[in-house]
Image (cartoon, grey):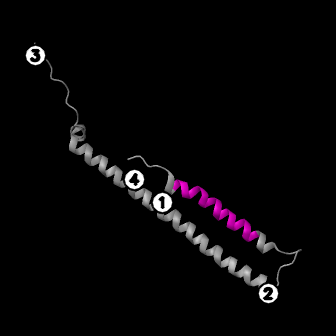
């Protein structure tokens, strides 16, 4: 009686099991992760910069209104709304800064 040969893994498994292929796969995944990080980094930082520019423009308009005497003790709603907007942008940056700059990325 002859012994039956052990089943061979598929060609894909054989190729992935080679050390050079595993290193290439790891390098490709690392590059894909870096690319994703860079896309998110520039998108989030750019969006924050856009909101900062908008806020500075609104601040200039409110400053011009204040110089003309448009605000009183009874009516200062634009100043209040701008304060809420500016603090929202600030809170978003408080979360983005650690996420983008301070979190240690494992390689």
The disc, 4 or 2, on the residue closer to the chain's N-terminal end is: 4
User: Mark 3 — residue?
Assistant: 2
Estimate the spatial distance between the alpha carbons at disc 4 and disc 1, rounded to whole Å.
Answer: 11 Å
Q: Which residues are magenta?
A: 81-99
Q: Which residue is mark 2?
A: 68
Q: Is residue 54 magenta?
A: no
Task: Determine which residue is flagged by label 4.
Answer: 33
- Taking 7 as reference, is 2 above or below it? above
The residues tagged by marks 2 and 3 sit, at their Cα atoms, a distance apart of: 102 Å
Q: 100 or 5, which is in the foreground?
A: 100
Residue 16 is left or right of residue 106, and the answer is left
**Residue most extreme to the right:** 74
Dominant SS type (magenta): helix
Q: CA distance from mark 1 to mark 3?
A: 60 Å
State the residue position of label 1: 40
The mark closer to the camera, 1 or 3, is 1
Indicate which disc, 4 or 1, sits on the residue closer to the N terminus.
4
């Amino acid at each position: 009686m002859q012994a039956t040969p052990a089943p061979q893994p598929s060609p894909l498994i054989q190729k992935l099991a080679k050390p050079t292929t595993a290193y290439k796969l790891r390098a490709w995944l690392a590059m894909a992760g870096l690319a994703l990080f860079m896309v998110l980094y520039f998108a989030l930082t750019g969006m924050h910069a856009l909101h900062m520019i908008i806020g500075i423009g609104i601040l200039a308009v409110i400053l011009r209104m204040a110089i003309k005497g448009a605000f009183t003790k009874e009516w200062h709603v634009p100043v209040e709304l701008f304060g809420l907007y500016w603090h929202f942008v600030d809170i978003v940056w408080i979360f983005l800064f650690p996420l983008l700059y301070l979190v240690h990325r494992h390689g």
